[in-house]
Image: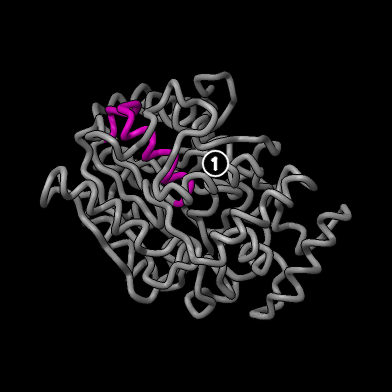
Amino acid sequence: MKPVTEKYTGKNLHFENIPFVADDGFTCNLIRVRGTKAPDKGPVLLVHGAGVSASIFLAPVNKNIVEYLIEEGYDVWLENWRASIDFAPNKWTLDQAALYDHPAAVRKIVQITRSTSIKAIIHCQGSTSFMMSVVAGLVPQVNNVVSNAVSLHPIVPNFSRFKLKYMMPLVRQMTDYLNPQWGIKAPTFTAKMINTLVNLTHHECTNGVCKQVSFTYGSGFPALWRHENLNEETHEWIKDEFASVPMTFYKQMARSVAEGHLLPGDHPKELPATFVGKAPATQARISFFAGARNLCFLPESQTKTFNYFDKLRPGFHALRVLPDYSHLDIFIGRSAYKDVFPLMSQELSVN
């Protein structure tokens, strides 16, 4: 997969690649993005989801979220944590990201910018793992968070629950990873078998990666976006934006979905036994965004977490359910710069 700097096709942005070492020794990186004018607002960190990379925020649309935030005056940082497809496939868990990646990324930004606080926009498994860091008090420098799609209460469609409970244990016996790139080239028997299954059941478009993404992440046709929200260039662009996701992630997510809230996986002694058992160790304001038509994580996921936070601190946090959006089209949709980004900017501006 090409790095962010080779994927971006826009103009007038400068990318600075800043490696950092996670607290367990895994090498990740931050990408600082600057425009033609110096920022007059503080740093904002964007955290991608599973099986993608930081470039997912640089969709070929009229104005992507990075361009929008730079125009708004923010100092924009993108985090490639260990789930990034820019790195070699590895059997990561949400625990590792929460304990080791996100705290180290935040400290690196604070060290470089000398800012006493930062804001964050977090998506999907970047959101779940980052929220684990927030609730556990591991990123005290973060004072404002915009969370998209899912955070502490993963609620999925019934068929996704079936897949997690019955199909994923079988798939784990055959492969350590699922990879939407199999929609382009299926190199193994398992890959060919899954690709055949996907082609037999998904007829929503002719983009093999798009169809594989829907099988990998949800229950829809498609699951992560509404086709009508994407321009043709973006629908083609996604072919290069998705790759390996480890079965270790699905194992942890299956337990969390069954329990009704996030659970620690491989580091239970270093993280809270439950992330909804006591008041979060943070003073950050959190805005929960959800697409009303999300078929990866149902919008009730964010509504339930918002209600949990709102009960602890009434009127402080925010909930935004967007009626015409799904999961990732909140960031890569053709009209997101008009429908979504102003709302996110509005929430970031609340102190």
**Which span is picked out in magenta?**
124-142
Q: Residue at x 30, y 66 (%)?
A: 321
Magenta residue check for 138: yes
State whether residue 15 is above or below residue 161.
above
Give how far across and how far down residue 75 sits, in percent. 34, 41
* The one of 331 and 192 positioned closer to us in this rendering: 192
Q: Looking at this view, is 31 or 272 the one in front?
A: 272
Residue 299 among magenta residues: no
* Residue at the spot of label 1: 252
Residue at position x 37%, y 71% in the image: 292
What secondary structure predominates along the stretch shown in magenta?
Answer: helix
> Mark 1: few, some, or many residues within 10 Å (few <14, many ≥20)?
some
Residue 21 image position (x, y, % from top left): 53, 22
Q: Is residue 34 left or right of residue 172?
A: left
Above or below residue 349? Residue 108 is above
Position of the C terminus, as image quadrant, is top left
152 lies above or below 339: above
Q: What's the residue at 40%, 38% (across, down)?
A: 130
Residue at 32% from the left image edge and 55% from the top image edge: 71
Name the amino acid, label 1. Answer: Gln
Residue 36 visible here:
no
Residue 21 position (above or below residue 305) = above
Instruction: Tell me the SS state at disc 1.
Output: helix
Whether residue 186 is visible to the viewer of this picture, yes or no, is yes
Who is closer to the viewer here, 171 or 105?
A: 171
In the rendered image, residue 106, in percent from the top left (x then y), is placed at 38, 29
Q: Nearer the viewer, residue 31 or 226?
A: 226
- Residue 41: quarter of image: top left
From the top left corner, tell me how far across and down residue 64 is, in percent.
44, 60
